[in-house]
Image (spheres, helix red, strand yellow):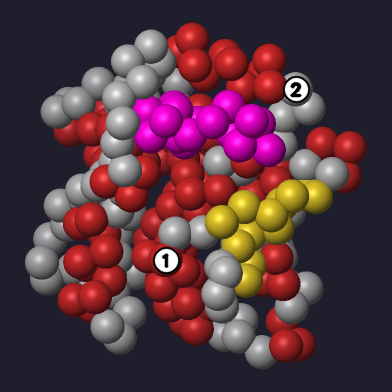
């Protein structure tokens, strides 16, 4: 997806309701970590570290584990989410990070549904174009392209995405031949309604959403 179309999807979750706040957190974590859909679905509370240095621990193919950094503003969003869902206690360490109304972990299909739901809302608006089918993998691809545009070395991208070979990562280099230097956290600038309610520190969170990956 382009920056504009990714932004359009991120603007869709309704911050006035808990499900919308969960979905926004899910979409941001999906992008920020470059996770595969199963890696995201498998995340437990213990897998996110919100103190310095903030990271997410992903378990990938062949049960290979890797830690990826989290942007500071993503950490703020996760803190609010964990507090709202009462997942802060040590007894919740093994609880699924993202779950449904029955407190069961979201499945691959559940994550895909969330992504598709908001992509369809963007399509209804008709203001920006999206790929024919927006899947969780599209967010992973978008993250990889943004890393390339920020001139991040392919070796790092290989490790970040959990690829076995740098050859796989080179696919993204061929997908984006501009290779313009951009600061990764300047890739997005969401515009959200000023009166949209969020967690306690509304203005701070809204400021982050406007500057997310600008």
Q: Residue furthest left?
A: 194
Badge 2 element: loop
Q: Residue furthest right?
A: 62
Which residue position holds label 1? Answer: 72
Where residue 172 appears, as percent x and y from the top left, is 52, 19
Tell me: residue 97, above or below residue 211. below
Residue placed at 67% from the left, 71% from the top?
Answer: 45
Where residue 173 appears, as percent x and y from the top left, is 49, 16
Badge 1 element: helix
Kindly report the distance in space between the C-alpha atoms of the residues bearing marks 2 and 1: 29 Å
Residue placed at 15% from the left, 52% from the top?
Answer: 191
Residue bounds of the magenta highlight: 142-159
Tell me whether the residue at label 2 lies in contact with that at label 1, contact meaning CB atoms closer than 8 angstroms.
no
The total of numbered circles placed on residues is: 2
Which residue position holds label 2? Answer: 165
Foreground residue among 149 and 38: 149
Q: Is residue 52 left or right of residue 190?
A: right
Categorize mark 2 by other alpha carbons within 10 Å: few (<14), some (14-19), many (20+). few
Report the predominant secondary structure element of the magenta stretch.
helix
As drawn, the label of residue 29 is none
Categorize mark 1 by other alpha carbons within 10 Å: few (<14), some (14-19), many (20+). some
Residue placed at 47% from the left, 44% from the top?
Answer: 31
């Amino acid at each position: 997806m382009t920056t504009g179309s990714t932004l359009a999807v991120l603007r869709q979750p309704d911050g006035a309701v808990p499900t919308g706040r969960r979905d926004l957190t899910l979409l941001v974590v999906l992008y920020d970590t470059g996770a595969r859909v199963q890696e995201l679905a498998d995340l437990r509370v213990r897998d996110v570290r919100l103190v310095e240095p903030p990271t997410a621990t992903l378990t990938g193919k062949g049960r290979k584990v890797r830690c990826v950094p989290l942007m500071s503003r993503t950490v703020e969003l996760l803190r609010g989410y964990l507090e709202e869902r009462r997942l802060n206690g040590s007894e919740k360490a093994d609880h699924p990070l993202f779950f449904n109304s029955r407190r069961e972990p979201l499945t691959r299909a559940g994550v895909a549904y969330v992504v598709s739901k908001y992509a369809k809302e963007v399509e209804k608006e008709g203001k920006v174009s999206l790929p024919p089918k927006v899947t969780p993998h599209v967010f992973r691809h978008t993250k990889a392209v943004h890393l390339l545009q920020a001139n991040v070395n392919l070796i790092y991208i290989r490790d970040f995405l959990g690829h076995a070979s740098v050859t796989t990562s080179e696919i993204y280099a061929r997908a984006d031949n501009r290779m313009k230097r951009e600061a990764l956290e300047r890739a997005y600038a969401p515009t959200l309604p000023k009166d949209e309610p969020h967690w306690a520190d509304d203005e701070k969170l809204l400021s982050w959403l406007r500057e997310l990956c600008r």
